[in-house]
Image (spheres, helix red, strand yellow):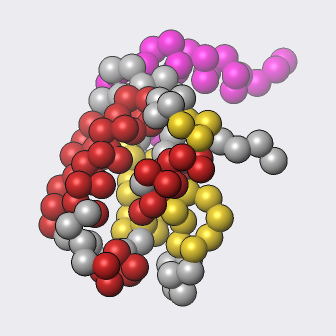
């Protein structure tokens, strides 16, 4: 299996985990480490648009955590919902919540595919995509006659 390379960060998954150890996946019940990282679950366009800044701000807050609190702090889930980035954690600090909320808001204005500025569109489903990526999506999903 080939190691993931994050172009927007200029680093491999191994380098990511060394620089940002809090991105390591944890089992939310046992808190045991699981292979991989949660950063890679963020859609590509959003990682390109603000991934590095998100990690840097989260790092600054994470570095204020006590050693014990670091052990218990966990990102439980990352996904797109209602056209925005959702990052769910276990108990966290108000500052970390502010950081997460900031990037949730930013995600509403950046294409989930390419990271370019865009507006959300509601066509029965909320898409946060630029015109180009939305047209490509429509072309890929058209039914063949």
Rendered location of residue 61, percent (x, y): 22, 60
Note whether 23 is above or below 108 in the view shown.
below
Give residue 73's position: percent from left, percent from top: 36, 74
Image x and y of residue 96, in percent: 23, 61
Q: Seen from this angle, which residue lies furthest bottom?
A: 30
Question: Image height check: is 40 above or below 123?
Answer: below
**Can you name the residue that lies furthest to the right here?**
145
**Left or right position of 65 against 127:** left
- Residue 56, position in %: x, y? 30, 46
Which quadrant of the figure has residue 141? top right
Q: Residue at x 44, y 51 (%)?
A: 19
Q: Is residue 35 left or right of residue 132?
A: right
Task: Tell me which residue sits at (61%, 21%) in the image.
Answer: 138
In which image quadrant can residue 67 be found?
bottom left
Number of numbered markers: 0
Image quadrant in which you'd find residue 5: top right
Asked if residue 2 lies in the magenta stretch, the reply is no
Q: Quadrant of the C terminus?
A: top right
Q: In the image shown, does 126 or 37 lie closer to the viewer?
A: 37
> Does any portion of residue 47 appear in the rendered image?
yes
Q: Is residue 143 magenta?
A: yes
Tell me what residue is drawn at x 30 percent, y 55 percent.
Answer: 59
Q: Is residue 30 above or below residue 136?
A: below
Q: Left or right: where does residue 81 sit relative to residue 91? A: right
Q: Which residues are magenta?
A: 118-145
Q: Is residue 127 visible?
A: no
The residue under the point 77% across, 42% down is 2
């Amino acid at each position: 299996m080939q190691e993931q390379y994050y172009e927007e960060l200029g680093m491999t998954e191994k380098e990511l985990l060394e620089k940002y150890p809090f991105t390591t996946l944890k089992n939310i019940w046992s808190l045991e480490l699981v292979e991989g990282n949660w950063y890679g679950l963020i859609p590509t366009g959003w990682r390109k648009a603000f991934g590095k800044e998100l990690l840097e701000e989260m790092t600054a807050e994470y570095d204020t955590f006590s050693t014990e609190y670091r052990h218990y702090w966990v990102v439980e889930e990352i996904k797109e919902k209602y056209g925005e980035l959702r990052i769910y954690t276990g108990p966290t600090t108000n500052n970390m919540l502010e950081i997460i909320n900031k990037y949730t808001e930013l995600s509403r204005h950046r294409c989930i595919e390419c990271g370019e500025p865009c507006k959300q569109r509601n066509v029965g489903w909320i898409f946060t995509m630029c015109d180009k990526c939305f047209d490509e999506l429509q072309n890929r999903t058209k039914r063949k006659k």
